[in-house]
Amino acid sequence: DSVFPSPSCISPFMVIGPSDPIVAVLRGDVTLPCSVSPAMNVENMELRWFRSKFSEAVFIYQNQQEQREEQLAQYTGRTSLVKEFLTWGEAAVRIHNVQAFDNGMYTCFFRKGSFYESASLELKVAGVGSVPQVHIQGLEEDGVRVVCMASGWFPKPEVRWKALSGEKFLTFSETHAQDPEGLFSVEATLVVRDSSSGNVTCSLLNPILSQEKAMAIIIPEDFFPRTSPWMSAFMVILTLLMLLLLGTAYYTKREHTAKCREVQEWMKLHREKEEDQQAKVEALKTRVSVTLDPKSAHPSLAVSDEKTSVTLKDTAEDPTILFSILGRESITSGRCYWVVEIRNGDKSEWSLGVCRGDVDRKSLHLESPEKGIWAVGRYLENYYACSIFRILLSCRQVPHRVGVFLDLKEGDVSFYNMTDDSHMFSFPLASSSGTLFPYFMLRSGDVSLTICSVMGGPAEILVPLNNPPSSSEEPVSLSGVGLKSVSDVDGALPGAESPLLPCSPEAMSP
């Protein structure tokens, strides 16, 4: 679409974009970062982000200000430039209120004088739609036809049917359609032929976010065909009954549907409550005290005498370096949890979570489960789950305290914003994750991470939906939850404290 002078033979810089796709949640915000190497001030360069063609501009920065003349209409008022790191050679455009059509490839283009370079990056948009609605549509010659419908999903969701026993139905039909906004609706039809299936569940899975919504329906055994001299009479009566139901007034049908939905939700909540109670009993047995291991700290980090707090010595170093430290305690089995207080966390860059013991952190420039690190943190003014996709988190309030709940029995690690008691994110853990350690990283800013101490007294407990704990008064030893200390220091665990431990100055003793 446009012709530029050829770059000079000697390249003064190169443009680097994310090597992995960036995931954005539908109707949320996302940041598309690019940088130059070697690092240099890019405030006076022309910076442009565009789609498949140069003229399809998403955002243009020139002469130290935004230029809107060539911007695509669908991005008007939805983009802004992150300027904090321009002097370090890092630039990023933020897209607000992400839509389905934002999904796809982007190019970031940097020009200085007659020389220019560019890099490509991929944005994956994902959104979870409505809860599936399931109903019996009619009878087949050898079974009962059940239909599952949902809308508002992106991308196209994966449909799964399963019986009460957990057995999956592999044969069913499904159709999809897209609305004007590009969101998918789905209709899946299953013929249940075995009356012993009891009830069936239809679930929809977002393949990018790994988030699922499901709904179950009970099929009465009398609905299934039988080899009996009364079958013909039964079919005639059933047909008459169905015709009668079709003739029922609309308001009666609406009340009936609402009642069925209410009963199904009650049954689901009842089952989850029973599972929650059992998980709560186990979770309260796993309180641990975490301390920092100074031997594992990067030289630019300062560790407190109590070994519970870490800060940056010098914030003027290269911002691409990850300054990290591990906890002393190794974790090999069971469940455990701890809470970290973040000072100035909303004005700096940091992350925390768990790390595999064999990770080479000296050469590490990217935190992800594939690299042996499961963490959440703040980068470029946003909160992320540190994945290969860098998943943007929507926090209602600034997370001044973050709770880490590690469950090696179920195979996941979950993070909670203790400021408003909300769930932030959960990672699945592979069975081969090995020995894990508490992980803390500081990247820039006047920030400190402080491990909250174990104190007495009841408090509310937050854990993942499949493992919500309750109160318990049974104390256990460190060995009971599969923890080992890297040093020779022994410590006894307290009695019935909250798993999401409060932090107070009087309790911060070594």
Image: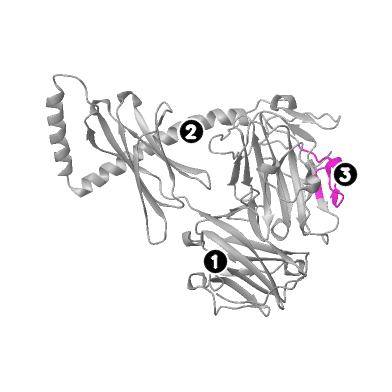
Please report whichever mark, 2 or 3, sits nearer to the chain's N-terminal start.
2
Number of other residues with Cα within 10 Å of mark 2, as a class: few under 14, some 14 to 19, many 20 or more: few
Disc marking residue 305: 3
The image quarter containing residue 333 is top right
Q: Which stretch appears magenta?
A: 290-310
Q: Nearer the viewer, residue 121 or 480?
A: 121
Q: Amino acid at mark 2?
A: Lys
Circle 1 residue: 51
Disc marking residue 127: none
Marks 1 and 2 sit apart, C-alpha to C-alpha, by 48 Å
Q: Main secondary structure of the magenta part?
A: loop
The image quarter containing residue 398 is bottom right
Which residue does the image show at 65% across and 57% down from the upper left?
18
The image quarter containing residue 497 is top right
Marks 1 and 3 sit apart, C-alpha to C-alpha, by 52 Å
Q: Nearer the viewer, mark 1 or mark 2?
A: 1
The vertical placement of 501 against 321, above or below, is above
Q: Is residue 358 left or right of residue 258?
A: right
Q: Amino acid at mark 1?
A: Arg
Q: Secondary structure at mark 3?
A: loop
Number of other residues with Cα within 10 Å of mark 3, as a class: few under 14, some 14 to 19, many 20 or more: few
Image location (x, y in percent) of residue 330:
76, 33
Which residue does the image show at 72% across and 78% down from the upper left?
113
Circle 2 residue: 273
State if disc 3 and disc 2 touch (CB < 8 Å). no
Q: Is residue 392 magenta?
A: no
The colour scheme of the drawn protein is one colour
